[in-house]
Amino acid sequence: MAETSKTALSILGEPTGACWSCGEMRAAHFCSACGKVQPPVPVDYFTFFGFPRKLDLDEELLEQEFYKLSRKLHPDVYAQAESREQQWSLEQSSLLNDAYRTLKDPIKRTEYLLRLEGVELEEQSKSATEKARATGEVKKQVVPPALLEEVFELNMQLEELRAQKKMGEDDPALIEEIGTQKLELEQKHDALLQELKNCWNEWDKLVDRGSEEDRRKARDKMLDLLNRRNYIRNLVRDVNEVLET
Amino acid sequence: MLMPDPRIVGIDLGTTNSLVAFMQGDVPVVIPGEDGSNLVPSVVALDERDQIIVGNAARKYLIETPERSVYSIKRLMGRGVEDIREELKLFPFRLAEDMRPGEVLRIKLGQATFTPPEISAFILRQLKRNAERFFNAPVTKAVITVPAYFNDAQRQATKDAGRIAGLEVLRLVNEPTAASLAYGLDKKQNGIVAVYDLGGGTFDISILKLHDGIFEVIATNGDTHLGGDDIDNLLIRIALDDIRGDLGMDVSRSGEAVATIRKAVIEAKIALSARPTTMLDVELPVGKPYQREITREQFEQLIQPIIDRTVGPCKQALKDAGLKPEQIDEVVLVGGSTRIPKVRALVEDMFRRKAHTDLNPDEVVALGAAVQANILGGGSEATQNMLLLDVTPLSLGIEVAGGVTDKIILRNSTIPASATQYYTTQVDGQANVAIHVLQGERELAKDCRSLARFDLKGIPPMVAGMPRIEVKFLIDANGILHVSAREQRSGKEAEIEVQPSYGLTDDQVEGMILDSFDYAEEDFRQRQVIEARNEVQTILAALAKGKQSPAWGQLTSDEKKQIAKLERALLQVKDEDDYAAIRKAIDALNQGTMRLAELMMDTAVSTALKGKTMDEADLGEAPVAGHPVAKADFE
């Protein structure tokens, strides 16, 4: 019974080693025999919840699992425990919260999975801008070509409205025009999100069977959708900022 | 299953008032002070004998010797000299003359100086004393509440204050969240709750999702320098202008006069919550009295700009939670300033529903802290299944090239939360890497709050860019940051030297714990009395047991009479505050029962010899010296 197996793959349910406290086989986060919290094992967020690396995730089930694990791992439960158990509970519950925060959000979840698959997502991020500034390299990703014309137009109008607002005036026609464009952008955003969700199913099917080539294609498609979606989101944010000031 | 320790108390360390509470069975209750009052004003003064006075007793010093007293110290917790220029214009804080930039603030009371955590510790110590008097037992563990929008430095300062006061701070709980616990105790339904908390000096808004006993904070926002104090200061300024105009006197530099005006405007403010008009009545130290009628309408007009400042944070919190006002099921009001009808109207207008005020807004935070204390102590039937999941109010970032903030943990992330960053070196053989940690939402590092500078030291010499240093940032359940680092190629734990931007080092806190005893004669006496009373309980219980044992029958009637006399003497002194007298009576009774104890031992042994085990024979606990008496567990 006290035999330890370090090669077990699945983290929930299946034993991964001996409990530090009672020596029985332990499950992932706490001992299945005595219930004591265990030192965290470095795993990805999907595995932490005992889920396969699939994107079409049951969000209700995720929330239920989050609450269930919170009740067992939160530091409040270990306030009177010995200090190493407190430390493990702190580490385990921060891992739980980080994992939940990432997985419950469809975009963050997709980005996280792509990163796990070795895809670089940094093109649009601030740190990429930083890196580009520091090294003098040209930042890779710019405007998605399909959006070029519209975006150019919109940016001009935003510039104009900013200038007007600075002077303490605003042109209702211009505001309306920008408002209409914003609505279109939001629709586009939602459409992209829907398309991304369709890609999830494609990916999920390829996880278990399917060639590396097919998987690469699916990843590239998701990356492209994410880039376009992020670009539009930033644009909408800019519009809101100008309209609200 | 451990029984919950009733002596873990919940403390609301407020800007204006502080309270201590505990769970009495299923209900949290506030522990009153010696004067019978539930509220301990957060006022600290140094009396003529250089002894610290706290609470109601200290209030008269605000007017009589303003230079030896201080209020609203919470405003200065975790802040630096450069942060408080504005506060200094409005509050009579007297900084030590030799303050250096970057140093923790020191406030003068008479000739002595104290840091804000030390002054807060005096208040905590008073609450601790009140609780110890109530329980007649030492209190060493507490849950302390802080504004949800407190940053890392302000939280750390509060935790330091607890340590200085001799309290192990089991948890810092956000005030609005604590309030929701108090409310949630008897209403176990699910739904979305908004807690609007406008206190003496701070404003918080928190939005929570209640789900089968889990209190999950979804978003929080606020302003740690917005509250009733700001209303008072506004009214004081108006009164000072009036006095200059009408009476031709500038009394703004007289601490005594300003303190008198402050007292009067607070009374007027409170009166206007109940009446349409009131009289501002100030007896100035010199010259004529100043009187002026204020209507509620005028008052509401005056305070509108102040209370409007709560709207922005509410909107932001809703936006962060991804909710519309209509989706809020309940609104709860917390903090004394929510007694102002105009504030209630504003909240009800914003959330489009009537707000809950069933619990006393001054007490609800302390009651909630007591609930959390009970949960941490192992829980009880009332708190079973209750779990608080709170968030960090501000994003955590690190400074990157160009003075830009790179956010690594976003605001409203459930805590504990963590982030891992990787660093390398720029120069061959570089042994140190500096990390500047920031808190706030702004893009530029200079606009965010500097938390600390971490120096990773002892990196093994390698070619530039080779080392891979993994730095883990972890925000614990108190909202306080911990940083650890490891060089991955060598597997060496990197040594981290922390320079908190606005905090005390561990050594400083240790020093302050020692210093605090200079002002704590009273504490020491109290502690001795409590310990002695505990001993009394033990010895009386043992004596009662002795009287039931066969050994009792073997005593002569003189011996029994003598014991009864000594017992009476002890009962007489046990409730007095005279440690020496209690001690003497205990020793006398110990002496007087020596033979009884010996006989009890003999009986036990002879019973054992007759074939019973020692356990069955029930040795009892003989009431004698030499048998160790349970000591109170003071640290």
Image (cartoon, coloured by chain):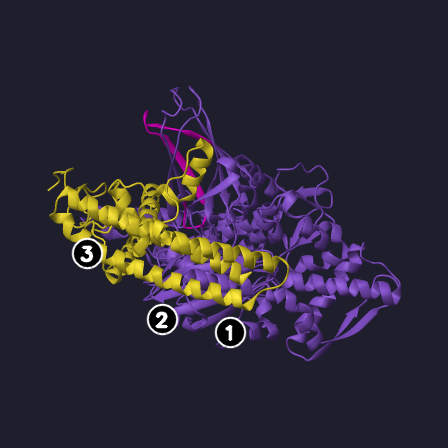
Chain colours: A yellow, B purple
**Front-lying residue, B115 or B516:** B115
Rate crowding at label 1 as few (under 14), some (14 to 19) or many (20 or more) other CA atoms within 10 Å: some
In magenta stretch: residue B285? no
**Front-lying residue, B3 or A110:** A110
Tell me the residue that label 1 is attached to.
B357
Q: Which residues are magenta?
A: B475-497
Quadrant the C terminus of chain A occupies: bottom right
Tell me the residue that label 2 is attached to.
B188
Where residue B571 sits in the image (x, y, percent)?
51, 59
Q: Earlier in the sequence, mark 2 or mark 1?
A: 2
Q: Nearer the viewer, mark 1 or mark 3?
A: 3
Q: Residue at x 50, y 64 (%)?
A: B315
Q: Quadrant of residue B186?
A: bottom left
Where residue B269 sits in the image (x, y, percent)?
68, 70
What amino acid does circle 3 point to? Answer: Asn
Distance from disc 2 to disc 3, alpha carbons, whole Å, reads 39 Å
Are the residues tagged 2 and 1 within 8 Å (C-beta)? no
Quadrant the N terminus of chain A occupies: top left
Distance from disc 2 to disc 1, alpha carbons, whole Å, reads 17 Å
